[in-house]
Image (cartoon, rainbow, N blue to C red):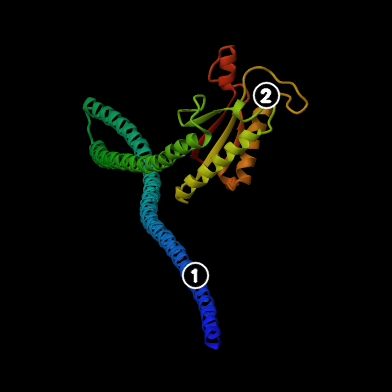
Amino acid sequence: MRSLARRRRALDIWPGFVDALSSLILVMVFVLLLFAIGQFVLSQTIVGKNQALAELDAQIAQLSKTLSLAQGNNRDLDARVKELSASLGQAGSERDAARTQLDAAQTEAAKLNADIAALNELKQQLERQVATMAAQFDQSKKDLVAATDLNAKSAAQAELLNRQLAAVREQLGKLSAALELANASVKDKDVKIADLGAQLNLALANKVNQLERYRSEFFGKLREALGNRADIRVVGDRFVVPTDILFDSGSADLNQAAQARLEKLAQTLNEVAAEIPSSLDWVVRIDGHTDKRPIHSDQFPSNWELSTARAVAIVKTLVVQGIPAQHLSANGFGEFQPLDAADTPEAYAKNRRIEIQLTNR
């Protein structure tokens, strides 16, 4: 009986041990599964980070390339500015030297002209004296021939007159030679003056051509800043903008759209001004124009006041945007410089305008 009871107790322990071992195995499998899932998630995260790092490396390489190009362009622009400054300084020195030589040549030419005038006056006086002495000599000869009793005194007087006449003629010849030499010198001075004038004109033309290049660049950027509108155009050396896109009718207050446009205009002008050498004395003229229809208000008694107030409003806005006041000019012309003299709404709209001009002071 006792042996049978032991066997039963032994058989009862074994299933519990199996259940505990199975539970332990399941726990281990669950832990391994969690570990595998964690490894998978970690590997996916690492792959994503690696891809992000690769993209960042590509962006950094692209930015480095862009920075290198920008630095190269900056160096090219610096070299171009230095070349323009050097050429401008040389042109200014040549112009100043040519102007100095021209002034000196003109002064010397004036002196020579005065000397020539004095020599001509002296020549005329001598010619009158020669004519008088020749007449006296002829009369003396006639008197001597007619007289029957020539004496030694008359002969001596005739000889003296002959010597005086010869001396006067010799002096007249010297004066004529000096006058010819002076005329030749004046011609040489005239040629030098013409050459100096040509050099001065060339120097001035170089100044104008340099400013013309900046004016073309300014107009191109200005058209982009204000928008490529059909009613915004270039007339000669002026950029023409209709006032209807900047001001309300009969008003000198800039509208909200005009404020944005003028900010772009100021930015464009600052970019162009940075490239213009300091030796060029430039100014941006803002000219206001109206149509011929009269205006009678308390604020604007005539179109003169309206056109001037609009130009001043634009100049003040540009000064606020950082444009130096010494490079700005405001002018009002009223209705007295129309582009179209017709009495039509189209002509009125064309004549209501703001003209912008980049020019020498």
Extreme residue toward the bottom, this view: 2
The disc at residue 129 is none
Q: Depth check: give the residue in front, 299 or 113.
A: 299
- The x, y position of residue 335, in whole percent, is 62, 21
Q: How far apart are labels 1 and 2 at the CA level?
A: 89 Å
- The x, y position of residue 117, in whole percent, is 37, 37
Element type at mark 1? helix
The disc at residue 249 is 2
Residue under numbered circle 1: 26
The answer to whether residue 312 is seen in the rendering is no
Residue drawn 49% across the image and 70% down it? 26
Circle nearer the viewer, 1 or 2 = 1
In screen coordinates, is 158 left or right of 19? left
In screen coordinates, is 21 left or right of 171? right
| 285 up-or-down from 50: above or below | above
Within-10-Å neighbours for mark 2: few <14, some 14–19, many 20+? few
- The x, y position of residue 337, in whole percent, is 57, 22
Give the amino acid at mark 1: Leu
| 105 up-or-down from 297: above or below | below
Element type at mark 2? loop
Give the amino acid at mark 2: Ser
Choose the circle earlier in sequence order: 1 or 2.
Answer: 1
| 298 up-or-down from 76: above or below | above
